[in-house]
């Protein structure tokens, strides 16, 4: 889906999954509704990396790069990238050496704060020992301008499981808090060129 406006950098929404999936579609619709109310002229493009399972993870970086290359041609770049889902943001933040991606304003959603960087496609996932990062604190070298992520309290979740097991009921893990940053907030310590806030 793309809304066209000539000569204006697009806002590129990239989802981990097919945008037709209801949870993704609902979030994109809510984003687009608020974005439209802002009156900004930037067109909105919606893409996905069709993430499926962990063994498929070797391809997430390649798919994401292929998607984003369309928006970085001939000296152009997106006004902002919106990442929806754990898989697509894990792929995005594994591009530490890509200056263009690091400078582009990015908004993160539909994921927990815990993140791993996706490895190169030659890695054997059976032997892979990923390093855990926190998307809210460990990626200051990227231009994260906003988002919403869940923080899971592991101890409380274990206590919940223990209590649930004792009472013979099952309860899912549940997030306890979330982090929200205004989409127009820019890092004061950023050495990247200034960008225009989208809303």
Image: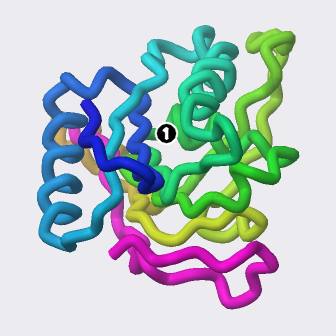
Based on the displayed image, in which of its 4 quarters is residue 188 positioned? bottom right
Give the image location of residue 165, x and y in percent: 28, 38
Q: Which residues are magenta?
A: 171-199
Relative vertical location of residue 52 with respect to residue 113 in this rendering, above or below: above
Q: Is residue 32 visible?
A: yes
Relative vertical location of residue 176 with respect to residue 58 in this rendering, above or below: below
Query: Is residue 3 inside the magenta stretch?
Result: no
Give the image location of residue 146, x and y in percent: 46, 69
Q: Residue at x 50, y 59 (%)?
A: 79
Based on the displayed image, in which of its 4 quarters is residue 194 positioned? bottom right
Viewer-closest of 48 and 125 = 48
Q: Is residue 101 left or right of residue 64?
A: right
Where disc 1 sits, the SS reads helix
- Number of callouts in the render? 1
Query: Please, what is the dominant secondary structure of the magenta stretch?
Result: loop
Q: Residue at x 43, y 17 (%)?
A: 50
Relative vertical location of residue 177 with respect to residue 172 in this rendering, above or below: below
Give the image location of residue 134, x and y in percent: 64, 59
Query: Is residue 187 inside the magenta stretch?
Result: yes
Q: Quadrant of the C terminus?
A: bottom left
Q: Is residue 178 left or right of residue 87?
A: left
Give the image location of residue 182, x and y in percent: 40, 79
Q: Which residue is mark 1?
A: 86
Q: Residues within 10 Å of mark 1 (few under 14, many from 20)?
A: many
Viewer-closest of 109 and 76 = 76
Based on the displayed image, in which of its 4 quarters is residue 180 positioned? bottom left
């Amino acid at each position: 889906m793309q809304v066209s406006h000539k000569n204006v950098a697009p806002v590129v929404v990239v989802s981990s999954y097919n945008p037709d999936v209801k949870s993704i579609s609902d979030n994109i619709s809510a984003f687009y509704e608020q974005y439209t109310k802002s009156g900004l002229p930037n067109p909105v493009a919606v893409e996905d990396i069709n993430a499926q399972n962990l063994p498929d993870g070797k391809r997430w970086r390649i798919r994401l790069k292929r998607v984003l290359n369309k928006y970085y041609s001939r000296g152009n770049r997106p006004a902002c990238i919106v990442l929806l889902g754990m898989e697509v943001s894990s792929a995005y933040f594994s591009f530490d050496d890509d200056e263009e991606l690091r400078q582009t304003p990015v908004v993160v959603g539909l994921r927990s704060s815990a993140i791993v960087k996706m490895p190169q496609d030659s890695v054997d996932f059976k032997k892979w020992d990923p390093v855990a990062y926190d998307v809210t604190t460990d990626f200051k070298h990227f231009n994260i301008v906003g988002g919403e992520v869940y923080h899971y309290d592991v101890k409380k979740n274990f206590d919940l499981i223990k209590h649930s097991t004792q009472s013979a009921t099952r309860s899912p893990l549940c997030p306890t808090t979330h982090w929200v940053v205004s989409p127009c907030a820019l890092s004061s310590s950023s050495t990247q060129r200034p960008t225009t806030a989208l809303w």
